[in-house]
C-alpha cells in the first residue's frame, strides 16, 4: 500500500440524510456543549459517506463525549473508561466489513486510555478515532485532564496542575498514525469534511476536535475566535509533521499529516481444519 | 520382576538438556504404548538456570505426581540440590550419576537412596571435546533409562525424530547415536526397572494449556487477545500459529486491559473470542469482566493459576484465584466459572466454555492451574465432545427501538450482529433500559439485574457439573490439579478397606447445588482439599450451604503439589 497516497474512495451506494443517523435520544450534555456540534458533524459525515447505519459501529469509553453512541442510530459499544480503542481494534480486525469509529474525550483517550492511544497508532488498524477535547474532566465536574493548561485553577489542583499539557497530535504522528487532523465543534460542516476524508484514508486516522466545555471551561467560548485553517499540511514526512504540531499553538485546523503506512493485513483464509490440529497430538504405536 | 509404573527425574544445570531428556523418555514411552506425565522444574533464571524434568510412565493413566521418585538421573550436580524439597526421594530411590560429576550433594544423599554409578562422560575425551559433546549426555541418559524400562530403540528413535524435527539430519543422527550409546550401557547396570507390557493404543501427547486451547478452537474461538504472562504464555504460543492457519486472529495487546477489551470487541462483532492470562493479569481484567456481564457480551477467560498474591511465584502452581474468579469485581456480576478436572478434561471444558459463553451471552472463566497447564501427558484421545450451543442472534422482528435488553421473557435475548439492518443496538455497561440506553431508575436497575441473574438460575450444566468417583461414606471434594492426587489417595484407602468417594466440581459458579447434594448422598464425613491458605473453596461451599459446618478443610498454599500420601493421611 506504500504507493497509495490518495485513498481509494468508495462511492455512496444509497442516499442518506443526517437525521437517518440520529437515534432521537436526548443527550445528557449541557446546553451549549461543543459535543452537539461533533454529533451533528458525525451524522452529516456518515450520510455523506453513504454507508447505512447498520454498517457503522461507534465505540466509546466513559465521559460526557463517550455518551455519543447512544445518540446515533448506528450499532454501538459503550464500554469502560479508557478502553474504546482496544474494543474497536478487536471488532475491526474480525469484522473489516464494518465502519468502526472510536469516540471519546481527552481524559478517556489521553489519560486512562493513553497506552491504548499509542499502540492503536502503532497498529494502524483501518478506523477513525475522534477525540472531543475540552481540556477538562466534565462528567466528574471539573478536574484537570492531560491537555489542561498548567495554571488552570481547580478544586482538586488549586493554582493549577503545574504540568505541561500532553500533545496528542505529536504523539499520534510519532507513534505511527496514518492520518492526523484537528477540527472544531463550532464548525460542523468543516468537521464533517474532515471526518469523511479521515474515514476514507487507509489505516488509523485520528481527529482531535476542540469541543468546548461551557460549564467548567466557559473561557473556551473564545475558541471560535482563535481557530484558523492550518497553513500547512504534511504528507508522509513524520519529522516535518511533528515539528509542525509541536510549534503550533493548538488552534490550526484541518489535515495536519497524512501518511502512507500499510494498514494491518487481513486475517488469512483458513488453510487447515480443527481435525488437522487434532492429528498433531496423536502418537502412533 | 516388572513394574506397572516408574517415576524418573532428569536433573542438571542449564544447558544440560534435562528437559529434552524427559521429553524423549515420555514420547518414546508413548510410542511404546504407555501412558505418562511430565512436569518441569526451573530455577529463577530466564536462561541457563538449573532444571529438572519429572517423568512418570505407566500402563495406566496418570493424573498425579507420585509420593516418591523411583529414579533420579543427575546429568550433573550443579545447583540441582535446590530442587530437593520438590523431588521426594527415599531409601528405595535409585540415584544414577556419573562419579566424574563429583559426590552426591547432601540434600540429595540424605534420602539414603541407592547410588548407582553410570559413566555418561567419555573419560578418553579432553575437556574441549567433552564440552562440545556435553549436550548429548542428556540423550545418553534418556537412552539408558528407556533401555532400563524396556522401551525399544525404535520407539526412542521415533521420539527423537519428532522432537528434533526441522533441526537437521546431523543433529537427529547425533542425538540418536547418544541415545543408542546410553541404551548399550544399560545392561551392565545392577538394576531391574522393566515395565509391564502396555495395552497399546494410539494416544495423545498433550499438555493442559494446549488442551484448553484446542478445546477452545473446537468450540469455535477464532479471536484471542492476550498479553504474555507465565504460566499461560505457552498456551497462546501454541495457539497462535494454529489460530492463524484456521483463519482466526491472535493479537498481542499492549496490556491485559487491551487484551480483554479487544476480546470483547471481537465477540461483539460475532466472533467467538477468548483471552488467556494468569492471576496478575486476571486482576487487571476484572473491570471489563463486569462490563461483559452488564452488556451481556460472551467471551472466555482462561486463568492458568499461579502462586500469588501479587507477582507471587510466576512459574509455580496454586489454587488461590477461586475467590477472584467467583466473586471478583464490583456490583452484582454473576459469571460462569469452570475448572477442568484433568489434563484430558481441559479439551472438553475448553470447548464447553465457549458454548456456555455464547449461549448465555456472558463471560465464562476457565480456572486452570500451572500444574495442569504445564503437565505434559500421554492420554487417551478425547472422544465424547460437549453438544454445541450457539449464540442467539436472530428471532426478533425489526422495529424501533429494538429492545436488545428486553425483560420479562426469556432472559437470553437476541443479540443481532452488527451489520444486520434495522436492529442496531448499543452494548451498554451503564445500567440501561430495554433499548440499551443509559437509565438510572430503580425499577430498571432491578429488572436488568434480575434478567441477568435469571440466565444463571436457568443454566443447567447437566452432566458437566462435575464428576464422582467411588462410593464411600467419606467424601473428598476437590478441583483442578488436586483431583488427581485425591483420587489416588482414595484408591489406596480403598485397597486398605476404607471406601472414599472423590467429588470433583467442574462447574464452580453458579454452584450446582442440587447435583452436589445428590453426589453427597449417604456421606457422613466431607473433606474439602484445596491448594490455598484461605480455604477459598471450603468457604464458598459453606456460604452456599452446600456442605455442613462439620465438613473439614484441608487447605494449604502451593507451590508444592498435593501428593496422594498427604491427602490419604488426612482422611485415614
Image: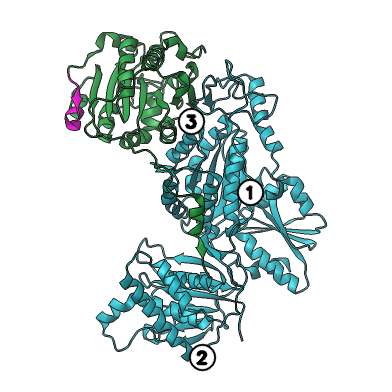
The lab-note entry on whether marks 2 and 3 share a chain reads no
Q: Name the quarter where the N terminus of chain B is drawn.
A: bottom right
Chain A on-screen colour: green
The residue located at (42%, 65%) in the rendering is: B43
Q: Secondary structure at mark 2?
A: loop
B526 sits left or right of A55 in the view: right
* Residue B495 among magenta residues: no
Pinpoint residue B456: horizontal percent, then vertical percent.
Answer: 67, 37
Q: CA distance from mark 2 to mark 3?
A: 67 Å
Q: Which residue is mark 2?
A: B190
Q: Is A117 or A272 nearer to us in this picture?
A: A272
Q: Which residue is mark 1?
A: B386
Q: How many marks?
A: 3
The residue located at (38%, 65%) in the rendering is: B165
Query: In the image, is residue A147 above or below residue B177?
Result: above
Q: Name the quarter where the C terminus of chain B is drawn.
A: bottom right
Highlighted magenta segment, given as a residue range: A232-241
Amino acid at each position: 500500500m506504500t504507493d497509495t497516497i490518495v485513498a481509494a474512495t468508495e462511492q455512496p451506494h444509497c442516499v442518506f440524510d443526517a437525521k437517518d443517523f440520529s437515534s432521537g435520544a436526548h443527550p445528557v450534555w449541557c446546553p451549549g456543549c461543543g459535543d452537539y456540534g461533533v454529533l451533528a458533524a458525525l451524522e452529516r459525515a456518515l450520510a455523506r459517506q453513504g454507508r447505512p447505519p447498520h454498517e457503522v459501529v461507534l465505540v466509546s469509553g466513559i465521559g460526557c463525549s463517550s455518551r455519543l453512541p447512544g445518540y446515533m442510530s448506528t450499532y454501538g459499544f459503550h464500554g469502560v473508561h479508557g478502553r474504546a480503542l482496544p474494543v474497536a481494534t478487536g471488532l475491526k480486525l474480525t469484522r473489516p466489513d464494518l465502519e468502526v469509529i472510536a469516540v471519546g474525550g481527552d481524559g478517556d483517550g489521553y489519560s486512562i486510555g493513553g497506552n491504548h492511544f499509542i499502540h492503536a497508532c502503532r497498529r494502524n488498524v483501518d478506523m477513525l478515532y475522534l477525540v472531543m477535547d475540552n481540556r477538562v474532566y466534565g462528567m466528574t465536574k471539573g478536574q484537570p485532564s492531560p491537555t489542561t493548561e498548567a495554571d488552570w485553577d481547580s478544586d482538586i489542583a488549586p493554582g493549577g496542575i503545574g504540568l505541561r499539557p500532553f500533545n496528542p497530535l505529536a504523539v499520534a504522528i510519532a507513534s505511527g498514525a496514518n492520518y492526523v487532523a484537528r477540527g472544531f465543534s463550532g464548525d460542523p460542516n468543516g468537521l464533517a469534511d474532515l471526518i469523511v476524508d479521515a474515514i476514507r484514508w487507509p489505516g488509523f486516522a485520528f481527529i482531535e476536535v476542540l469541543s468546548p466545555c461551557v460549564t467548567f471551561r466557559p473561557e473556551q467560548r473564545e475558541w471560535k475566535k482563535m481557530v484558523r485553517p492550518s497553513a500547512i499540511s504534511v504528507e508522509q514526512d513524520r519529522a516535518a509533521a511533528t515539528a509542525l504540531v509541536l510549534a503550533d499553538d493548538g488552534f490550526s485546523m484541518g489535515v495536519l499529516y497524512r501518511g502512507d503506512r500499510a494498514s494491518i493485513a487481513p486475517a488469512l483464509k483458513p488453510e487447515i481444519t480443527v481435525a488437522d490440529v487434532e492429528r498433531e497430538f496423536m502418537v502412533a504405536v | 520382576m516388572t513394574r506397572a509404573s516408574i517415576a524418573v527425574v532428569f536433573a542438571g544445570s542449564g544447558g544440560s538438556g534435562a528437559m529434552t531428556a524427559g521429553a524423549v523418555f515420555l514420547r518414546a514411552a508413548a510410542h511404546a504404548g504407555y501412558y505418562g506425565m511430565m512436569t518441569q522444574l526451573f530455577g529463577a533464571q530466564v536462561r541457563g538456570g538449573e532444571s529438572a524434568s519429572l517423568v512418570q510412565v505407566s500402563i495406566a493413566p496418570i493424573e498425579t505426581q507420585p509420593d516418591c521418585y523411583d529414579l533420579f538421573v543427575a546429568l550433573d550436580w550443579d545447583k540441582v540440590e535446590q530442587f530437593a524439597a520438590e523431588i521426594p526421594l527415599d531409601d528405595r530411590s535409585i540415584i544414577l550419576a556419573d562419579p566424574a560429576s563429583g559426590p552426591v550433594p547432601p540434600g540429595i544423599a540424605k534420602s539414603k537412596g541407592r547410588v548407582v554409578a553410570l559413566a555418561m562422560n567419555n573419560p578418553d575425551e579432553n575437556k574441549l571435546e567433552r564440552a562440545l559433546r556435553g549436550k548429548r549426555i542428556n540423550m545418553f541418559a534418556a537412552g539408558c533409562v528407556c533401555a532400563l524400562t524396556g522401551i525399544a530403540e525404535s520407539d526412542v528413535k521415533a521420539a527423537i525424530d519428532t522432537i528434533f524435527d526441522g533441526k537437521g539430519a546431523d543433529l537427529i543422527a547425533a542425538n540418536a547415536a547418544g541415545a543408542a550409546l546410553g541404551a548399550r550401557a544399560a545392561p551392565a547396570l545392577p538394576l531391574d526397572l522393566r515395565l509391564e507390557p502396555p495395552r497399546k493404543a494410539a494416544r495423545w501427547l498433550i499438555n493442559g494449556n494446549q488442551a484448553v486451547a484446542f478445546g477452545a478452537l473446537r468450540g469455535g474461538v477464532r479471536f484471542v487477545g492476550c498479553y504474555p504472562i507465565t504460566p499461560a504464555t505457552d498456551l497462546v504460543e501454541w495457539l497462535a500459529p494454529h489460530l492463524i492457519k484456521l483463519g482466526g486472529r491472535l493479537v498481542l495487546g499492549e496490556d491485559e486491559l487491551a487484551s480483554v477489551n479487544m476480546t470483547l470487541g471481537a465477540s461483539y462483532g460475532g466472533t467467538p473470542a477468548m483471552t488467556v492470562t494468569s492471576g496478575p493479569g486476571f486482576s487487571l481484567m476484572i473491570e471489563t469482566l463486569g462490563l461483559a456481564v452488564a452488556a451481556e457480551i460472551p467471551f472466555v477467560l482462561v486463568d492458568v493459576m499461579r502462586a500469588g498474591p501479587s507477582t507471587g511465584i510466576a512459574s509455580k502452581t496454586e489454587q488461590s484465584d477461586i475467590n477472584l474468579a467467583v466473586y471478583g469485581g464490583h456490583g452484582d456480576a454473576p459469571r460462569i466459572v469452570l475448572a477442568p478436572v484433568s489434563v484430558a478434561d481441559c479439551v472438553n471444558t475448553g470447548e464447553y466454555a465457549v458454548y456456555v459463553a455464547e449461549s448465555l451471552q456472558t463471560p465464562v472463566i476457565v480456572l486452570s492451574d500451572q500444574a495442569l497447564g504445564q503437565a505434559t501427558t500421554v492420554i487417551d484421545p478425547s472422544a465424547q465432545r460437549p453438544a454445541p450451543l450457539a449464540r442467539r442472534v436472530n428471532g426478533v422482528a425489526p422495529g424501533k427501538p429494538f429492545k436488545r435488553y428486553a425483560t420479562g421473557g426469556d432472559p437470553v435475548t437476541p443479540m443481532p450482529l452488527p451489520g444486520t439492518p434495522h436492529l442496531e443496538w448499543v452494548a451498554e455497561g451503564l445500567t440501561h433500559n430495554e433499548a440499551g440506553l443509559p437509565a438510572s431508575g430503580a425499577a430498571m436497575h432491578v429488572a436488568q439485574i434480575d434478567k441477568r441473574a435469571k440466565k444463571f438460575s436457568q443454566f443447567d450444566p447437566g452432566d458437566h457439573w462435575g464428576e464422582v468417583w467411588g462410593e464411600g461414606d467419606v467424601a473428598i471434594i476437590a478441583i483442578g490439579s488436586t483431583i488427581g492426587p485425591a483420587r489416588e489417595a482414595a484408591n489406596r484407602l480403598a485397597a486398605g478397606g476404607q471406601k472414599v468417594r472423590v467429588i470433583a466440581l467442574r462447574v464452580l459458579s453458579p454452584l450446582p447445588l442440587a447435583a452436589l447434594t445428590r453426589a453427597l448422598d449417604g456421606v457422613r464425613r466431607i473433606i474439602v482439599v484445596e491448594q490455598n491458605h484461605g480455604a477459598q473453596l471450603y468457604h464458598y461451599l459453606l456460604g452456599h450451604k452446600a456442605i455442613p459446618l462439620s465438613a473439614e478443610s484441608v487447605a494449604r498454599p502451593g507451590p508444592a503439589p498435593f501428593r496422594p500420601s498427604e491427602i490419604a493421611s488426612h482422611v485415614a
